[in-house]
Image: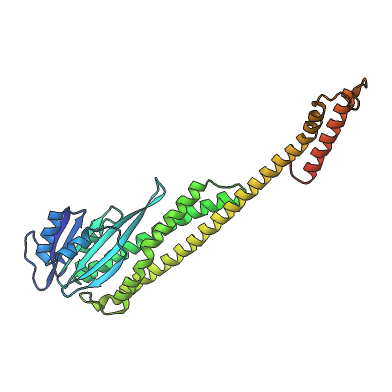
Amino acid sequence: MIIDRAVYEEGHRLDAGAPRTERGFAWVGTVEPTDDELSVVADDFGLDDFDIERARHLRQRPRIDVRADHTYLFVRTASYDPGTERVVMGDLAVFLAEGWIVTVRHGEALPLRSVRSDLEANPGRLAGGPTVVLVEVLGRLVQQYVEVAEKLREDVEDIEDLVFDDEIPAPSTKLYSVKREVVEFRRAVLPLLEPLQQVATDHVAHVSTDHRQEFAHVHDNLRRVIDEVEVLSALTDAALGANLTLVQVRQNADMRRISAWVGIAAVPTMVAGLYGMNFEHMPELGMRYSYFVVLGVLTSVSFGLFRLFRRYDWL
């Protein structure tokens, strides 16, 4: 769907259908576009079949490619869903040239309508052209990364409380679910570091050098997000290791308890087995109180074993 298609001159939006002038630029925003819609955009801005295929293909690695007539940037979008406690991923492809910019968004993780409205409310800034739009989009993207990282930290802290506070093994599904979200988020964030560094420090065709400082600021924010993600990854690994240790300790305690009861039950079982052999000549068979004597001995031995196992914390 083509969400919005506008032409701007000196930061002001022109009437619908107005042609693009040398001083202005066009901004086309699409969400989950169909092949026909992509073909229309491609014809208007000279994109070839390879560009259309890249805009259609999802789950690429964040990258920046410079071509003769435009620059292509692909990023992964992310937002946190508090209902499911999961990171919702999406994709955003940006085609950028001197006089136009096209965004192709997949997923609802990063709505760009607010970016457009904020820039239209500030014509002086929007007069900077497509590069300003790119700065705002990347800045909003990284800010959303920051918010996702904060929510993931809360989830990791909840896991730490489950594992370390009461020393009771936490549910494995919860641990691995958070670990999976951290890993998925890391895959989206980490590869973006190189493209952002490139636009912040190098000369990239179709990207104005007047905004390098702003790109550098976005790059620094991304580095802080990456540092936070690395810490979260290490914390989840530590929590998983500690939880596995608690599970093993719990299993060992259960095995000791079972072994202790087996040991206590072994003595009366052995004696009962001997007297169940029905031999003709066996000790104490002719004694009047032999049953009570054997019963007393078994009780004393079993109680002694019970106290011994309790002393060594097996029971």
Q: Residue at x 34, y 67 (%)?
A: 192
In the rendered image of this protein, does residue 189 appear above or below residue 161?
Answer: below
Q: Residue at x 61, y 47 (%)?
A: 168
* Nearer the observer, 174 or 51: 51
In the rendered image of this protein, does residue 271 appear above or below residue 187?
Answer: above
Q: As drawn, is 160 to the left or to the right of 81?
A: right
* Nearer the observer, 100 or 58: 58
Q: As drawn, is 297 to the left or to the right of 85?
A: right
How far from the left and from the top, in percent, is residue 198?
Answer: 31, 75
How far from the left and from the top, in percent, is residue 147?
Answer: 39, 58
Q: Residue at x 58, y 52 (%)?
A: 244
Q: As drawn, is 246 to the left or to the right of 102?
A: right
Q: Quadrant of residue 229?
A: bottom left
* Nearer the observer, 21 or 242: 242
How far from the left and from the top, in percent, is residue 20?
Answer: 9, 67
Q: Quadrant of residue 69?
A: bottom left
Q: As drawn, is 180 to the left or to the right of 10?
A: right
- Which residue extends farthest front? 280
In the rendered image of this protein, does residue 273 appear above or below residue 232?
Answer: above
